[in-house]
Amino acid sequence: MAGLSIHDARKSFGETQVLRGVSIDVADGEFAVIVGPSGCGKSTLLRAVAGLEELSGGRIVIGGTDVTALPPSERGIAMVFQSYALYPHLSVYENMAFALRIAKADKAAIDAAVRGAAAILNIEALLDRKPAALSGGQRQRVAIGRAIVRKPQIFLFDEPLSNLDADLRGRMRYEFAALHKTLGTTTLYVTHDQVEAMTLADRIIVLRDGCIEQVGTPRDLYARPANIFVAQFLGAPKMNIVAATVAEDCRARMSDGRTLALPADAPRLAPGTPLSIGIRPEDIAIGAAPDALSFTVGFVERLGGLATVHLASGNGASLACQLRDDGRLTEGDSVPVTLPPDRLHLFDADGRAIGGAARE
């Protein structure tokens, strides 16, 4: 195993800058996830680490060795692609053994490596089958097994679950976590799915437009988002953002004219200062309370035990609230809504977090 350091990685395609000076350190044995919207540069960065894409500038260091100029075969990495990339004419056993045979490994060592990886992934019964006879989840296990047998210093995963249905993605997330616990290999995993990032990562790297927005543990990023982009990218339903201005007596005035109390630990800002107020849907309370505001139920998404309630005021302010579904709320109901001050996140006019206190 080995750690990974990416120093000031830059990549341009013609006049288009895809990576704008990205620097990341992944510790030995860490499971790091790069997450971001389509086109943010995350797959380009992963391919650069693998040696499949040449950087326009910057360095890549694996296990203390600068590998920036080395070919993929000399970097000590194994990559699992979104498309599995299995040889259709070869059996599962032959697919997993292929790289070792090309490297002229001993036949007994190849057999031991393939059967050992198959045991870890619970695919021993599939070794004689061809890829066409496998389900999507089984093909993904084979692709992972092909990576395992190489005993790489670093695993690279490029959106490996995106071709699977929702139920299988959930099961495979558990298997990825269990696999990392078993092997302990340093892992860099790319996805656009924030659920995968939150459930798998030791640390998350949030990327946007080729730049890092924030790095931290899943809980840190959820509780202490550095800006509105991170706040709304992580979490489903996404964080509510309400435009407001600072009022007197540690309160803020929303765009519909009504005021609400700010957190007790909020920095003192001059009245009239514009800001955005964020609150997670699960932190909104519906029910009579001293500082409650009246909203109208616009739509209720019922999800079994939970419901997402979409609320609107008469002047355009809207919120999404998530709560246990008792079946009593219906469209058109007028309900009292409380935004607890200690659950609020504050952002300045540029969308950057103000204060930084965690809302655990």
Image (cartoon, rainbow, N blue to C red):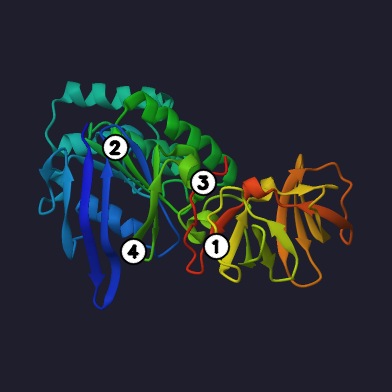
Does residue 265 appear anywhere in the picture? yes
Q: In 3D space, how far apart are the residues under numbered discs 1 and 3 (Cα atoms)?
A: 16 Å
Q: Residue at x 47, y 68 (%)?
A: 350
Q: Which of marks 3 and 4 is nearer the N terminus?
A: 4
Q: In 3D space, how far apart are the residues under numbered discs 3 and 4 (Cα atoms)?
A: 28 Å
Q: Where is residue 75 in the image (x, y as percent from the top left)?
A: 16, 44
Q: Which of marks 1 and 3 is nearer the N terminus?
A: 1
Q: Is residue 170 above or below residue 213?
A: above
Task: From the viewer's perspective, tell me whether residue 285 is left or right of residue 173.
Answer: right
Q: Nearer the viewer, residue 166 or 12?
A: 12
Judge the density around disc 4: few (<14), some (14-19), many (≥20) Cα neighbours within 10 Å.
many
Task: From the viewer's perspective, tell me whether residue 333 is left or right of residue 34.
Answer: right
Q: In 3D space, how far apart are the residues under numbered discs 4 and 1 (Cα atoms)?
A: 33 Å
Residue designated by label 4: 210
Secondary element at tag 3: loop
Q: Which of marks 3 and 2 is nearer the N terminus?
A: 2
Secondary element at tag 2: helix
Secondary element at tag 4: loop
Q: Which mark is residue 269?
A: 1
Q: Position of residue 306 (x, y in %)?
A: 74, 43
Q: Residue at x 39, y 39 (%)?
A: 130
Q: Which quadrant of the figure has residue 294?
A: bottom right
Q: Mark 1: which amino acid?
A: Leu
Secondary element at tag 1: loop
Q: In 3D space, how far apart are the residues under numbered discs 2 and 4 (Cα atoms)?
A: 28 Å
Judge the density around disc 3: few (<14), some (14-19), many (≥20) Cα neighbours within 10 Å.
some
Q: Which mark is residue 357?
A: 3
Q: Mark 4: which amino acid?
A: Gly
